[in-house]
Amino acid sequence: PYDVLVVGGGPSGASAAIYAARKGIRTGIVAERFGGQILDTLSIENFISVKATEGPKLAASLEEHVKDYDIDIMNLQRAAGIKKKDLFEVELENGAVLKSKSVIVSTGARWRNVGVPGEQEFKNKGVAYCPHCDGPLFEGKDVAVIGGGNSGIEAAIDLAGIVKHVTVLEFMPELKADDVLQKRLYSLPNVTVLKNVQTKEITGIDKVNGISYVDRATGEEGHIELQGVFVQIGLVPNTEWLGDTVERERGEIVVDKRGATNVPGLFAAGDCTNSPYKQIIISMGSGATAALGAFDYLIRN
Ligand code: FAD
């Protein structure tokens, strides 16, 4: 069996695997897609000490760094379930069962899509999901934010300080964000809020040039010319495969300061946890924390 089995091969999983292997313990990493979300990221400008890079390039260096250690890499393998007996047993979709004394779950998350025409086509060409990451790319331009919950309104406030104008589109008749956020939003001069509207299409030619919507009360159609659309209707953690083995909040695995879950020996890191901010540098830090937490657990058991 492994001492530490990492499930998930994004920044947090890679970091966890390297930290574990550096303790000289038997380490494996299983990933559906090694690299994770950064494979879908064009430019990365906030990975500190690297001024600018591209997602696939960073994913390749992650893999190279992991391969520098004695770590079993099982790429293109999806975990389907986990059980705790004497050891943890992680079952893969192909039927294989991997045994380990401790497990670090780092299966990340995915942005919920609006599912309108143009969204897939213009991803990274004006359609964005992360204001901390991509906001500065739209400096001086007009953008829309789809979603009037806390994350949507936080994004709109954040973007209003960078871009020329922000239009918020909310499907329901009222915004769902906290009052303080709404007050702050309405105090800004360069924000328009459209409520009770359904986004119909993100338009463009080789990149986004506008958004079309329908007023749900009147049926009237509208179109706004703009250069960017931030989709903020939720980040869904990839934790469905865990069944009811571990405590979660809104799907996010609940971890303590050491990355430990409520199940002894089961740790978690990165975007699949209840960490409040989801960023590469943060997920790498939490991967390191979880690996050191797992090592502490192993030397005590
Ligand atoms: P992920 O990167 O999501 O990796 C999860 C891993 O788990 C993957 O290998 C996946 O294949 C695997 N996996 C999932 N389910 C299973 C399963 N059942 N079995 C086995 N493996 C599984 N952050 C920044 O700091 N700067 C940026 O500029 C930036 N830009 C972004 C742009 C986009 C378009 C997106 C989507 C995200 C961006 N982010 C950015 C956020 C950043 O990518 C994430 O915070 C980071 O990737 C989280 O790392 P993670 O390892 O926790 O999860």
Image (cartoon, rainbow, N blue to C red):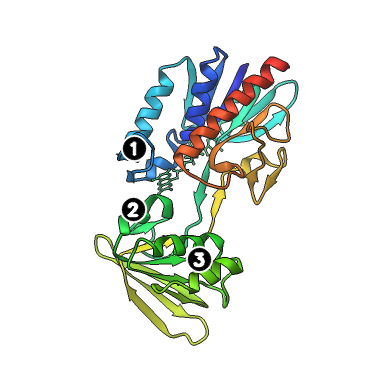
In terms of sequence position, does the residue under pointer 1 or pointer 2 come before the other?
1
User: How far across and how far down the image is residue 39, in percent?
Assistant: 38, 40
Q: Is residue 77 left or right of residue 140?
A: right
Q: CA distance from mark 1 to mark 3?
A: 29 Å
Type of the residue with mark 3: Gly
What residue is pinned by disc 3?
A: 147
Q: Nearer the viewer, residue 15 or 118?
A: 15
Disc 1 and disc 2 in contact, CB within 8 angstroms: no
Instruction: Residue under label 1, please give it.
Output: 56
Q: Position of residue 261 (x, y in %)?
A: 69, 35
Q: Earlier in the sequence, mark 1 or mark 3?
A: 1
Cα distance in 3D space between marks 2 and 3? 19 Å
Look at the numbered disc 1 and give the secondary structure of its residue: helix
Give the mark nearer the N terminus: 2 vs 3: 2
The x, y position of residue 36, in whole percent, is 45, 39
Quadrant of the rendering where the N terminus is positioned = top right
Q: Amino acid at mark 2?
A: Asn
Disc 3: CA contacts within 10 A as few (<14), some (14-19) or many (>=20): many
Is the residue indicated by label 2 positioned so its CB lies within 8 Å of ligand 1? yes
Amino acid type, mark 1: Pro
Residue at left offset 38%, top offset 80%: 222
166, above or below 10, in the image: below
Name the side, left or right, on which 44 lies relative to 242.
Answer: left
- Mark 1 vs mark 2, CA separation in Å: 13 Å
Q: Which residue is rendered at x = 67% and y = 18% of the image?
A: 298
Direction from residue 239 to residue 8 in the image, left or right: left
Above or below, 235 relative to 255: below
Residue labelled with disc 2: 124
